[in-house]
Image: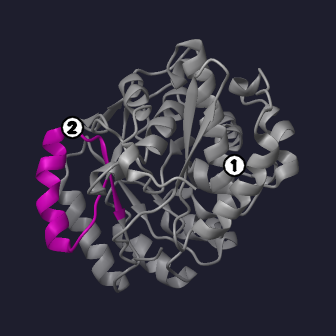
Amino acid sequence: MMGQAIIERTGLLIRFQDENNHSGWGEIAPFPGLHRENLSTTEGQLLQSQKTLRGHSLPPDLPQLNGAFERWLEEYQLFPSVRCGVETAALNLLANAQGKPLCALLSPRYRSAVSVNALLSGSPEEIRAQLPSLVAEGYKAVKLKVGRQKVHDDAEFVRQVRRALPGSVSLRLDANRAWQLREAVDFGKAIRDCSIEYIEEPLQIPSELNKFHAETGLVLALDETLAEISPGDFRPFPGLAALILKPSVIGGFARTLQLARLAAIHQLKAVISSVFSSGVGLAAEAALAACVNEEDIPAGLDTCRWLAEDLLAEAFPLQNGQIEVEEAFRRGQVIRMEMLERI
């Protein structure tokens, strides 16, 4: 994942259907370099699992995300991306069967719109050119990848981006575990007056994150670390400000919500994020994002801007830096079937 160019995105869609012809779609799309599973292994596991899943009734308490999915799916030992797709298909089916959007199925209290952070991508010149239009479109936060240049160059570019943004737009950094501690500290000290909202995973050795915070004062977000532990093993530490929650990496909505609840207990931000999903996955992730935070914390669901084509018949509803959640659900149910190949 570290800086590689992806020119094609492939994956699987699954559909659950009940006896009344209500249906629900789920997306399974492992990302190269991030997921341990790949498209071939997920397809094999899905085909094997569907032999026993077919014909079963869905547990009625699945929407509560309180352990029902674990009890139902534990025996299958599904890959995280497969588990996420199965959960999404089941929840979408239940929502359609009850005649309500997914966000309303998950919670009676949900936000009608979810802000997203703009993902900055391209050369430094291209990124600088993007900033005025992103600000004009109403984005409340932008996310910049770091750790791909020399430390000094990275820090200088962060300073340039921060100067180009108004104070009302927060700047988030993502290092994807690029540095050893000393490099990271040098970087952190060079930008600590830049009003950074947080930096994701700066260190190759995560156990040293508390040292990084102590020496730089910068606050942190966990991303890759959350895929390496179970929710029950999560422990906060000084300087931790946010959890980057990617359902397809963590292993579904139930585990993601468990971590989001822990974030709330420890007064951390829960940032629901995608891994370059199609509109099918994004619509479901937006529904979850609308339910996990009382305040509008920008989610990492801006990736639809980078897809040349989508699976949805209508364009994904991202406008003015926000996703209209109910409209996203409606559009997420109508698929361009000509883009699919049955297996």
Residue closer to the observer: 39 or 294:
39
x, y percent for residue 198: 45, 55
Q: Which of pointers 1 and 2 indicates the residue nearer the eye?
A: 1
Q: Left or right: 293 with respect to 139?
A: right
Residue 142 belongs to the span the image colors magenta = yes
Crowdedness near tag 1: few (<14), some (14–19) or many (≥20) residues, C-alpha within 10 Å: many
Q: Left or right: 10 with respect to 26?
A: left
Query: Is residue 258 visible in the rendered structure shown here?
Result: yes
User: In the rendered structure, which segment of residues is drawn in magenta?
Assistant: 119-144
Residue 200 belongs to the span the image colors magenta = no
Quickly name the residue at label 2. Answer: 138
Up the image or down, 90 lies above or below 271; here it is above
Using the image, tell me which numbered label, if any, was put on residue 83. Answer: 1
Q: Earlier in the sequence, mark 1 or mark 2?
A: 1
Q: Tell me the residue at 53%/25% (across/down).
A: 102
x, y percent for residue 237: 68, 55
Question: Which quarter of the picture shows residue 326?
Answer: top left
Using the image, tell me which numbered label, if any, was put on residue 212. Answer: none
Q: What is the C-alpha distance between the residues marked 1 and 2?
A: 34 Å
Q: Tell me the residue at 53%/13% (across/down).
A: 99
Crowdedness near tag 2: few (<14), some (14–19) or many (≥20) residues, C-alpha within 10 Å: some
Q: Tell me the residue at 15%/64% (across/down).
A: 128
